[in-house]
Amino acid sequence: MTLTASEKQFFLRNERQVNELVSRIMAIFLLVLCGLLVASYFHIFKVPVRDVLSIMAGAIGFELVLLLLLRIDAPSNLVKYYGVISIQFLISVMIANAYFGIYMCFILAPAISCLYFDRVFTRQIAILGYLMMLIALWFRAPLAIVLAFPGYTVTEWYIAFGLGYTLEYVALCTVLFALADRTRRYLEKLYERNERISDIQTKAIFRFADLIESRDDSTGKHVKRTSRYVQLLLEQMKQDEFFRHQLNEYDYVNILMAAPLHDIGKIKIPDAILLKPGKLTADEFNLIKRHSCDGGDIIIQTMDGIEQEDFVHHARDMARFHHEKWDGTGYPAGLSGEDIPISARVMAVADVFDALVSERCYKEAFDLDQAFTIMEEGKGAHFDPRLVDLFLAAREQVEAVINE
């Protein structure tokens, strides 16, 4: 089955999460080795301290390198191979030492590989693990004969136990691979269904926006253009070190989907005020200002319990707070700085810029140079200064949207 871009992102995200799990398994492995040392010290059972310390040193080295790879955000595929093969190597070293009664642990690395839902990788780890297990058993044979099987030759012990381990390995791998394959196919079908549902939701959201456009053509076009500006700004934020870790992938998707709804509250404003060509009175302007709170309420009332909670959260924030200002002089709540939800800060930049460059029934459009100058002057007063810098850096793409 050919994966969509979003499905690829899903499996890549899963790969990163399993990489972190591998690091935790390595840490648990170190704790188990420490437990062996403590048990040996109190004569609960005897293990060769020198061998345990050697394995611990190797495990610490593998874990430090793995943590470094995760820290520097190394290619996920590299981390995947390094982590799982490291665990397989450590298990094999312990299998090679007859003092350790390890049996089914040799299947640990192939089991972990199944969590990646990558058939090729799982097969590779299974084959490599099997070869490493056979090598480890060969090194285990002489000491095992001395300790527990004096009647065997090395070859006899190796064949007998190698065959037993092989049967266990094949049986366990077959079950694990079947479970992993069924899970992956189920996830692909589930994701395909979710994509269809998401497409329906997206169309419904734009129908909401069309309710505004049917009353005020300039506002409707404003909804579409601001959505494009939000998209450009989010793309810039993904590349920015400051914002990169503040939002996850789902946040970016939800903010972009919610952008068309930021002015949904205007459906409650009478046409006589919304389409008035002249200057508004103070009472009329106060009524206009209510659209932000009305928009947030409409989103909660119509979407809460139907749409995903994170989407509703971002949509409500964008509708309610996109007229807040960085210096606290905006409305409706007078929020300032980072107390303003980040989705609303993004929307504010897109909203004001489009208002500047658009002709309205009550104003002429500013030229681009004027508009960008006003945006820059609004840094730290009206807008989040970091977001303005990112928006200005995307001027070429912004102008392309306007030219369309």
Image: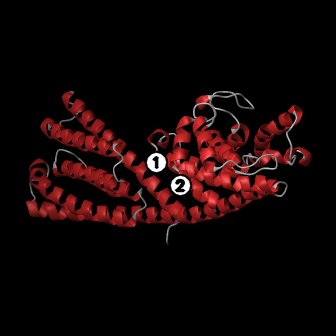
Q: Residue at x 16, y 48 (%)?
A: 98
- Mark 2 is surrounded, within 10 Å at the Cα level, by few (under 14), some (14 to 19) or many (20 or more) other residues, namely few
2 and 1 marks in contact (CB < 8 Å) = no
Q: Amino acid at mark 2?
A: Glu
Q: Residue at x 28, y 50 (%)?
A: 87
Q: Residue at x 75, y 41 (%)?
A: 296
x, y percentage for residue 334? 70, 27
When the figure is inspected, residue 369 is found, relative to residue 115, above or below; the finding is above
Label 2 sits on a secondary structure element that is helix
Label 1 sits on a secondary structure element that is helix
Closest to the observer, 212 or 102: 212
Q: Which mark is residue 396?
A: 2
Closest to the observer, 290 or 382: 382
Q: Quadrant of residue 347?
A: top right
Mark 1, residue position: 239
91 to the left or right of 236:
left
Q: Quadrant of residue 374?
A: top right
Here the colouring is secondary structure
199 to the left or right of 145:
right
x, y percentage for residue 342? 60, 38
Residue sticking out furthest to the bottom: 1
x, y percentage for residue 382? 64, 34
